[in-house]
Amino acid sequence: MPANRFNGHCDYGIGIGLRVPHYSHILSKKPVVDWFEIISENFMVEGGRPLELLDKILEQYRVVQHGVSMYFGSADKPDRAHLRRLKNLVKRTKTPWLSDHLCWGSVDGTYTHDLLPMPYTFAAARRTAEKIRQTRDFLEIPICVENVSSYAEFHASEMTEWEFLSEVVELADCGILLDVNNIYVSSKNHGFDPYDYVNNVPHDRVGQMHIAGHTKFEKYILDTHDHPVLDPVWKLYARATELCGVSATLLEWDDKIPSFDEVHNEALKANEFIDGAKKAVV
Amino acid sequence: MKRPPKHAPERIASTEDLRSFQRMMATAVTRPMTAQDGLQSRWIDGRPMARVAAEFVKPNDRLSSFERLELYNQMYWFRLFSAIQDDCPGLRAALGDGKFMRLARAYLAKCPSRSFTLRDLCSRLVEFIRKNPRLTAPRTALAVEIARFEWAQTVAFDGEARPVVDAQGFARTPPDRLRLGIQPYLTLLDLRHPIDTYVISVKRREVMRSEASNTPDASALPGRAARRPSLPRPSRTCVAVHRHNNRLFYKRLSPAAYRILAELARGQTLTRAVAAAGPGVRPAQVRAWFTTWMALGWFCAPGNKRLPRAS
């Protein structure tokens, strides 16, 4: 959906992640970019250069917050101090929606700093949805949850990953940040058809999409974000766009980061598939 | 983290089941790796890890349950190693790679992250080094000082800044009642070694190495860039690690100036703090110091919240 209640009714186009190696280029050249995605945690600080830089970016660009530490799927209760810090940042950036991952990563207050996969059970879905609702009510903005890439599955699971995602977002009444690269990576690691995933999520809840590169190893694929987007992922993106409509799309490139122009040009390739989807609708 | 259950729950039908499952998985993911950077072959109760992993992780046609869990174990440790190396280049250079990595493994095993951000990963490192001197012997005192200095840099980079007390704020209160806070982002250090110049030389070397690594011929590396900086010789060094215009700075202080700031940080009045400088310090010198410190915005209203610890 181009603009819906899960992305604050915004039609944001194609963005890229705001990353340190590009700061000086962005601030000095002021390139035209639809929007930047920031990692919330990088700016949940009390002062100094990160916030100064963020304020300069906010003067010129639209920014959407993407988190890596809410851990909606952790059994622990939401951390109120963390939510307060996050809300302060939300007020600063005026992000129209906020995204984080459908995963867990901490238990008893110990953090793994990883996006660990969930056991896909109904009880886990209920707990996760409850935490998403609590977070949304506190932050007072729409939330989209992102499917993660994974390297393990669990015996305890009672459904497929896309069924679990659908269950959670319906129970929480929240949006989806559909990461098509993660779907592709997990499909290869777990042996499912990525199109089954894309075909079966609730398309009207997709508020944003992610695209990225990955790395193939002999026995698995790693979600490395250090390459251009590979063809199978573009094809999956095209299918997702056909089904969901043209969503705000973001390219993630987090390691071996090339020049700003190279990253931006890679992201703009999404236009080819967006145009295709638009023609199909006409 | 609390001890995991003996067995992962077969069904996850409640939040408590989910918590048990997550304790099991997190214990496996965060367990120290073997010397070969692999998942340990035995679980915490001595059972074969392969059997324990198979209880809750599905294998696939390419990887066993053990191997799938091992991927997460390795990613956890490599991520944390990368973060601690980024934050502690000086400590790493002083100890050497082997000893530094042994310290990092021991520290992270004993003090796993309790924060949502890796920024705080080294917040307990100084205390850990002090309590475990054998890991850094015979350079424990130096290691403590470098770790303190490098943590101070983290604080200076993005720590809280409070509203600055200006000259009028000074003038309103008589010196024998005036108490000034020191900005939370500023750390005062009284060191036995010139750690500031050492860390600068380490960073300079890192930059040179990084630039040199782009050259196609490794033999083109300038000899100076490849050499490890000499360890600092003992020499008392008082320094304030702070930021100005959001850039990181180290400002050397005379011992007398340090004592004044340290007393202010402890909550003493201006009169008592200045007296701590000692009889040999001229009033004009003290005025000049305060003029500089005020220009740098170091003073704020006193408060109990996170006053920098002087030492």
Image (tube, rainbow, N blue to C red):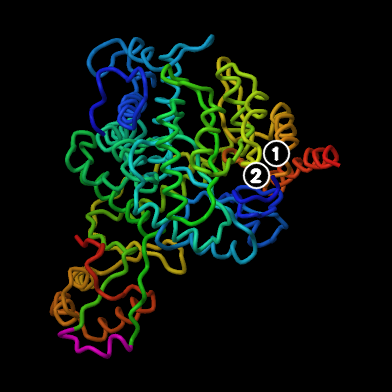
Residue for point 30% across, 80% down:
B290
Q: Determine the residue positioned at 67% across, 49% down.
A: A15
Q: Position of residue B124 (x, y in %)?
A: 26, 45
Image x and y of residue B56, in percent: 38, 17
Spatial CA distance of label 2 from label 1 is 15 Å
Say which of A270 and B172 sits in front: A270
User: x and y percent of residue A254 in the render?
Assistant: 57, 41
Chief SS of the magenta region: loop
- For the N terminus of chain A, the quadrant is top right
B110 to the left or right of A176:
left
Mark sitting earlier along the chain (2/1): 1
Frontmost residue, B209 versus B58:
B58
Taking the spot 53% from the left edge, 48% from the top edge, the residue there is A143
Which amino acid type is shown beneath numbered disc 2? Leu
User: Which of the 4 image quadrants contains residue B132?
Assistant: top left
Q: Chain of mark 2?
A: A
* Magenta stretch contains residue B175: yes
**Pair 2/1: label in front:** 1
Considering depth in this image, is B153 or B25 the residue closer to the camera?
B25
Identified by mark 1, the residue type is: Cys
Which segment did they paint magenta? B168-177
Answer yes or no: do the residues labelled 2 and 1 have beta carbons within 8 Å? no
Q: Which residue is mark 2?
A: A250
Q: Position of residue B89 (x, y in %)?
A: 39, 44
Residue indicated by mark 1: A244
Residue at 28 percent of width and 84 percent of height: B287
Q: Is label 2 on the same chain as label 1?
A: yes
Instruction: Tell me if B132 is positioned left or right of B25 in this view.
Output: left
Establish if A222 lies above or below A255. Answer: above
Drawn side of residue A257 relative to residue A92, left or right = right
